[in-house]
Image (cartoon, grey):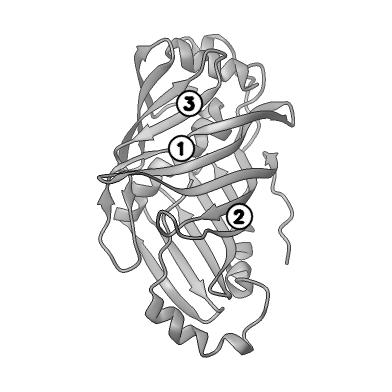
Amino acid sequence: MKTRLILPLAILAVVGVSAGVVATRPGADLAAEFRLRLAELRPGPEGAPLTEADVARLPEPVRRWLNRSGALGRPPVTMVHTVFEATLYNAPGRPGMSGIAHQVDVLDPPRRLFFMTTRMNGLPVAVLHDYTPEWAGMRVRAARAFNVVDRWGADFARIETVTFLNDLSVFAPSALAGPGFEWTPVDDRSAQVAYTVGPNIVTATLFFDETGDLVDFASDDRADISAGGEPQRMRWTTPLSDYREIAGRRVPGRGEAVWHREDGPFVYGEFTIRDMAFNRLLEVER
């Protein structure tokens, strides 16, 4: 769940000069860029169904999650396309920015796209993330004209590797039995994982409830990136709830993204699943 978004008021004031002549649909031009990147993605070839033997080395709560999620007995997921109704917050107590968000995860080769359109101060704003293990970044465009944030690099790729690990844990748990995941048992409701992909190694702890559902994910390897500022590394969690079945797979219907700051937890993102597809792409509105 996603990077905190802050748009400098000075830039928005400049953008506001042209607000009367921009299109009313948020982020239309950056949406075209998202569709071009999306067209590059393909699901991987179908593998053999995941068996009990494949997951035998995993800690018990992780094995339960793979079974409960519907991963066992099916070929591993190679692509997930999730559509959210999302709300992002700039600061505690401030009004949120709501909109539709698309998130696409591809396992081999690893790739993640995230795209959201919203409005801030009446202006259309679009957010695009693109991740590979070697190179990643984000672009935030206001009023279809100004890149308020345009940050890319290998350092961002390491930060976004945590996000990719979170996506796999929640929406494609069959991946957790694959190479690159080193597990450490904690207790009957949690387990730690070190995930290696490309040049990155990140760690996280997964938490489960008494039924076996994944209910939280915590990592200290992610960083809050404010526009124009330096990354601030801090604990990041994604509480999950409202489980449901989609295409025969058990997924959380709601999630939050939380920074654990010195002054207390800050829920900066709220996400409700609107649609999902496994091993294929959903249609994107033009």
Give the quarter of the image for residue 116.
bottom right
| Callout 3: SS | helix
- How crowded pointer 3 is (Cα within 10 Å; few <14, some 14-19, many 20+) is rated as many
Q: Going 34% across and 35% down the picture, which residue do you hit? A: 219
User: Is residue 108 in view?
Assistant: no
- Direction from residue 150 to residue 168 in the image, left or right: right
| Amino acid type shown at disc 3 | Leu
Between 187 and 258, the residue placed more toward the observer is: 258
Instruction: Find disc 1 in the rendering and name its residue.
Output: 238
**Cα distance between the residues tagged 1 and 2:** 17 Å
Between 197 and 86, the residue placed more toward the observer is: 86
Camera-side mark, 3 or 2: 2
Between 139 and 240, the residue placed more toward the observer is: 240
**Cα distance between the residues tagged 1 and 3:** 18 Å
| Amino acid type shown at disc 1 | Thr
Q: Earlier in the sequence, mark 3 or mark 2?
A: 2
Give the vertical position of 58 relative to 202 (above or below). above
Give the quarter of the image for residue 30.
bottom right
Q: Going 74% across and 31% down the picture, which residue do you hit? A: 247
Position in image of residue 51 (x %, y %): 59, 13
Q: Going 60% across and 64% down the picture, which residue do you hit? A: 117
Instruction: Find disc 3 in the rendering and name its residue.
Output: 176
| Amino acid type shown at disc 2 | Ala
Q: Earlier in the sequence, mark 1 or mark 3?
A: 3
Give the quarter of the image for residue 48.
top right
Position in image of residue 130 (x %, y %): 48, 57
Q: What is the quadrant of the C terminus in the image?
A: bottom right
Camera-side mark, 1 or 2: 1
Q: Going 55% across and 70% down the picture, which residue do you hit? A: 125
Instruction: Find disc 2 in the rendering and name its residue.
Output: 101
- How crowded pointer 1 is (Cα within 10 Å; few <14, some 14-19, many 20+) is rated as many
Give the vertical position of 95 relative to 61 (above or below). below
